[in-house]
Amino acid sequence: MIKVLVIDDDRMLFRLLQAHFKNFRSGAYELDWAETYEHGLIRLLTGAYAMCLLDFRLGERTGLELLREASEKGCRTPVVFLTAESYGNVDIQALEAGAIDYLVKGEITPRSLERSLRYALKLGETLDALRRLATRDELTGLLNRREYERILADEHERALRFGLHLGLAIIDMDQFKAINDTHGHAAGDAVLKEVGRRLGDSIRTVDRVARIGGEEFALILVQTDEASALEVARRAVLAVAKEPVPVGDGLLLGVTASAGVAAFPSDAGTAVELFAAADRALYEAKKRGRRAAVSAREVREGS
């Protein structure tokens, strides 16, 4: 069932759209209705809908404002504008705001509506795939280095503004080159994918895990001080080494990792300094014999 949200202050139009949907040649759709800007925005931000039909005028506010606000809050639901106006630059305004298509209310037919919905859903899938390619590591499916840097900068700014803690753990596989050299790159890839999965399972849903280098990962830990971040890193290191990784042909490889931890504001003032502090702690963990998690505080105090 494809869920579609209609945001429009005209109940009669919603009933007309319901009638049009019943005349579609194929596809099973479920329509929900929101008649105000506020109610519509709340529902749209749930992410529960495959697409949205959005009225260009919503009382004293506009659908353009709603779409811009939803986009700023991370909404990626495909939107088709509904407008009573068939002149001027309504189409340009809608597309610039992020809409995929627009329909003139007085000209809507079951055929034109179905065509627009199919187009919006297909284009939405394509855009999602492109966004994934731009933000995800191809091998592990984790966030890539560019997206990690963007999120870390955003979380640092939020922590700075609201006086929050922010933890960062840099995790590096121990002696990973030996795996590639001895067992081949296919085995190395299998190890990286499994380690990425284990790291993802070791953090909260509000935290982020990224692959930021060949065998290097990062955990962005929101509202987390250094002591708590160190505990998370220790659990992550244990999770990596908990059991051997299957790499094909019945072969199991034991793997370990080391971690360096730092936190804002106790260890750094900027996102760049935060990474540098965590990286120094990682270097110390390697010096101590690997398979360990070390904090920036330990490095400073020489403990």
Image: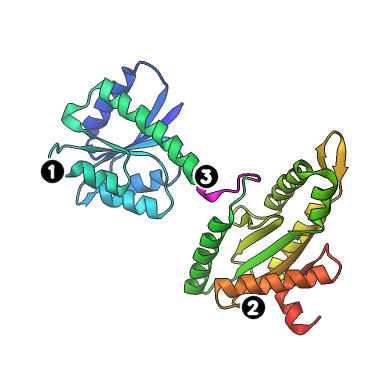
Looking at the picture, tell me which residue is in the foreground, 255 or 81.
255
**Which element is circle 2 on?**
loop
Q: Name the residue under label 2.
A: 267
Kind of residue at badge 3: Arg
Q: Kindly report the distance in space between the C-alpha atoms of the residues bearing marks 2 and 1.
A: 55 Å
Q: Give the range drawn in magenta.
A: 134-140
In this view, 239 is above or below 87: below
Neighbor class of circle 3 (other Cα within 10 Å; few <14, some 14-19, many 20+) is some
Is residue 210 part of the magenta span, yes or no? no
Kind of residue at badge 1: Gly
Question: Label 1 near label 2: C-beta < 8 Å?
Answer: no
* Residue at position x 41%, y 41% in the image: 77
* Residue at position x 81%, y 80% in the image: 303
Q: Name the residue under label 3.
A: 132
> Which residue is at the far bottom?
301
> Which residue is at the far left?
87
Which dot, 2 or 1, sits closer to the camera? 1
Q: How many labels does the image show?
A: 3
From the viewer's perspective, tell me whether residue 128 is left or right of residue 262. Answer: left
Q: Name the residue under label 1.
A: 88
**Which element is circle 1 on?**
loop
- The image position of residue 92, as x and y in percent, is 22, 44
Is residue 135 part of the magenta span, yes or no? yes
